[in-house]
Amino acid sequence: MDPLLVITNSDAGTADAQRLEGALDILRRSASVEVSATSNPGELDGVLHRAGSRRIVVAGGDGSMHAVVAALHRRHELADRVLGLLPVGTGNDFARGNGIPLDVVEAAELVLHGEPRPVDLLIDELGDIVVNNVHVGAGAQASRRGHRWKHRLGAVGVGKVNLGKLGYPIGALLAATHPPAVRLRVKVDGRVVNDLDRPVLMVALGNGARVGGGTELNPDADTEDGRIDVMISRSVGPFAKFAYVAHLSRGRHPERDDVVQLKGSTVAITGEEFWCSADGEVHGPERRRTWRLEPAAYSLILPPQG
């Protein structure tokens, strides 16, 4: 098999390092493996510069995957790469949405025996990328607040159930008690699907389906389908907000009459100031953002189809 370059996060905890060792043992049985730990973009760029033809395996969570894909995109090397993922992060939403085992040893077996397939990417007007999901409005506030709860609950578990995945629903509940409705114009493929006279609670653009440790924000999103899944929540009334969050926690929010789902290739959002959460990183306040889909932007090792 091709030699592997496993990129890890220098700031990862002891528990993550111990989990990773079992996966590395599996990989070393079948391939030459080099492990490089990075803690900032400069170090990551240096590691990628020396990668040569080796297959890159990301050992980390959604943030690590975003960092490596973004760096390869900046270097104009992404299209020629095949990436593998060992999910040793907290949320691992990108792995969940793509059927990559959350057991890191099983994920290592997938790296060795899986099927490289082209997956999509979102790119904004500044050239920055989104691997998994981007959302604005109350969802971004939920990410800001849920991040704290995710870490508080991440150490709490019953058996194999880690309560950290409740962070995003809890953040959404906290956000729903405070934010005003945001007046936004949303265009999908140039067509206005929500105008300023229809306040929204949040808008979510899904390349992947899950956020916040397992919450299915865009349940039908698929990284291989060549489309952006757009979800608009108009649940702006006091009771509607709580009902929306309750449905969201069970993945049933698309059933609501005040939730709109669409698919497209480009999305533009303008209007009142809003916050934006892209792959868990919160930015803002913003007044205008656009995203387009880059289909089959790179290859990812996934479970065989069928």
Image (cartoon, rainbow, N blue to C red):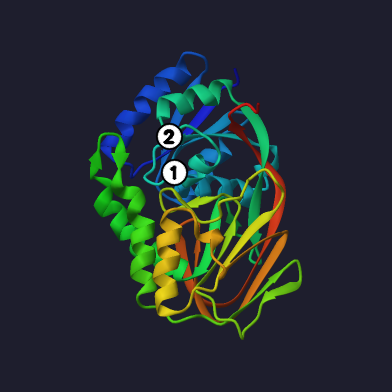
Report helix, strand or loop for mark 1.
loop
The tag earlier along the polypeptide, 1 or 2, is 1
Where is residue 228 drawn, in percent x and y? 66, 56
* Amino acid type indicated by mark 2: Leu
Quadrant for residue 198, please give it. bottom right
Whether 185 is drawn above or below 243: the answer is below
Question: In terms of depth relative to the viewer, which is nearer, 300 or 71?
Answer: 300
Question: In terms of depth relative to the viewer, which is nearer, 77 or 15?
Answer: 15
Residue 28 visible somewhere in the drawing: yes
Where is residue 260 drawn, in percent x and y? 61, 66
Locate residue 108 relative to residue 22 in the image: left or right.
right
**Do the residues under discs 1 and 2 have CB atoms within 8 angstroms?**
yes
Q: Residue at x 53, y 43 (%)?
A: 97
Q: Tell me the quarter of the image containing the C terminus.
A: top right
Where is residue 299 drawn, in percent x and y? 65, 37
Mark 1–mark 2 Cα distance, whole angstroms, equals 8 Å
Locate residue 222 relative to residue 266 in the image: left or right.
left
Q: Residue at x 69, y 37 (%)?
A: 80
Q: Residues within 10 Å of mark 2 (few under 14, many from 20)?
A: some
- Disc 1 marks which residue? 92
Whether 53 is drawn above or below 243: the answer is above
Residue 144 visible somewhere in the drawing: no
Q: Tell me the quarter of the image containing the N terminus.
A: top right
Report helix, strand or loop for mark 2.
loop
* Amino acid type indicated by mark 1: Asn
Where is residue 51 drawn, in percent x and y? 57, 34
Whether 112 is drawn above or below 234: the answer is above
Question: In terms of depth relative to the viewer, which is nearer, 241 or 141?
Answer: 241
Locate residue 133 relative to residue 250 in the image: left or right.
right
- Disc 2 marks which residue? 102
Q: Residue at x 70, y 53 (%)?
A: 227
